[in-house]
Amino acid sequence: MRDSGSYPLRALIAVARFLWNLPRTVLIGLLITYRRLVSPLYGPVCRFFPSCSAYALEAVTVHGAVKGSWLAFRRLIRCHPWNSGGVDHVPEGHRIWDTKKVPRIIVLNHPVIPADEDSRSAA
């Protein structure tokens, strides 16, 4: 027979986890909507790689709503005509994903770059 006390505890944990992840999930939804509806209207004009919206999406995915929003805000502040841009990756977080379940935005923002004959091997 099952322990009847474990079901309410599991339900409480599930509700707490849902509420904890809700701000992150809402921000991810807003960023995905922006990337699908608004971003294509501008075309490829970002001076950074990954683009600011892709950076924000990865930052919120990896670091959560608060720290990810802070990282995205700092990135937007650096995006101005006097900045030369370049490659600017999101700092690594503490989350570890199964190799088959890595979020798509991380894979897109960190492509494997093959080495050519004149350079050192790709990392």
Image (cartoon, rainbow, N blue to C red):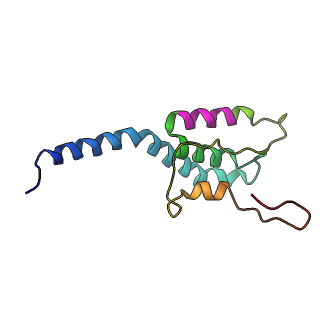
| Residue 113 located within the stretch drawn in magenta | no
Relative to 44, 38 lies left or right: left
Please state the horizontal and vertical placement of residue 5, each as a whole percent of the image. 13, 44
Which image quadrant: the N terminus? bottom left
Q: In which quarter of the image is residue 123?
A: bottom right
Q: Which residue is drawn at 78% across and 35% down?
A: 80
Q: In which quarter of the image is residue 86?
A: top right
Front position in the image: 104 or 52: 104
Q: Main secondary structure of the magenta part?
A: helix
Q: Which residue is drawn at 34% across and 42% down?
A: 17
Please state the horizontal and vertical placement of residue 29, each as a whole percent of the image. 49, 48
Front position in the image: 19 or 14: 14
Depicted 70 relative to depicted 63: above or below: above
Relative to 97, 51 lies left or right: right
Q: Quadrant of residue 111?
A: bottom right
Q: Which residue lies furthest to the bottom in this view?
A: 117
| Residue 68 located within the stretch drawn in magenta | yes
Relative to 119, 56 lies left or right: left
Please state the horizontal and vertical placement of residue 44, each as a whole percent of the image. 75, 53
Front position in the image: 120 or 75: 120
Q: Which residue is drawn at 20% across and 42% down?
A: 9
Which range is magenta?
67-75
Relative to 58, 9 lies left or right: left
Please state the horizontal and vertical placement of residue 84, each as a whole percent of the image. 85, 40
Q: Residue furthest left?
A: 1
Q: What is the total number of numbered labels drawn onto the structure image?
A: 0
Q: Which residue is drawn at 31% across and 39% down?
A: 16
